[in-house]
Image: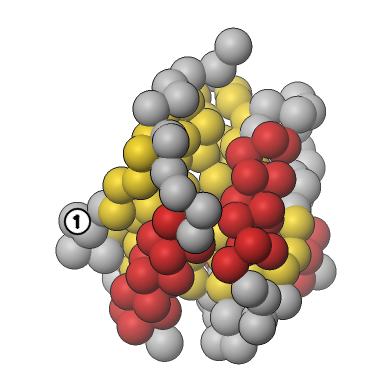
Amino acid sequence: MYTHKNIGVFFDYSKRLIGVPCGEDEYGLIGLDIFFVLEPGCDDEELEAFILKLLGACYSKEYIPTEPTAIQKYTGIKSPITAVKNYGILNIDWLNGERYIFSPMKPDKQNRGGFVGAGGIEISVPINYKTGALALAFRHALKIAYEHTF
């Protein structure tokens, strides 16, 4: 049983969501080469189902370092740096069945194609959350990440 899961949710200017579940390599957690898409305008129930679907897909396949990344596959762009150029990202961590942590990210000006935390902001939701709490935390984190990206 895994004690930590991580998903990266890329978003574009229109707020289309491209979710990437994690797997692992010899160094730790890493995004798999699979993705799920959620279109803008979804309701809270659809958003929470999307998040849980992504978490359920973590570790669902072996990480293959020679495969293009999920965002490269989604965009059809060969360069990983160019593939993320028009996207922002936020991370969601699931920690040992205790809580979810939503971390808005921003483009890293020193590392082309990389992202760093947006001001150290983390939004925590307990594992026994009430319906709608995951969606509320996600929308808040997305708003922060979006403002730092576009």
Q: Quadrant of residue 95?
A: top left
For the residue marked with disc 1, what is the amino acid?
Gly
Residue 103, given in percent of the width and then of the height, sits at: 35, 55
Q: In x, y percent, where is residue 70?
A: 71, 53
Residue at 38% in and 27% down:
98
Left or right position of 132 against 25: left
**Image quarter of the N terminus:** top right
Residue count near mark 1 (Cα–Cα under 10 Å), binned few <14, some 14–19, many ≥20:
few
- Toward the top, the furthest residue is 1
Rendered view: 40 above or below 92: below
Residue named by callout 1 = 120
Give the residue drawn at x 37%, y 66%. Answer: 141
**How many numbered marks have been drawn onto this rendered protein structure?**
1
Give residue 114's position: percent from left, percent from top.
42, 60
Confirm whether residue 7 shows in the render.
yes
Nearest the viewer among 140 and 126 is 126
Q: How is the image coloured?
A: secondary structure
| Residue depicted at x 45% and y 49% | 130
In percent of the image, x 32 and y 74: which residue is there?
A: 144
Q: Quick one: 42 or 113, which is closer to the camera?
A: 42
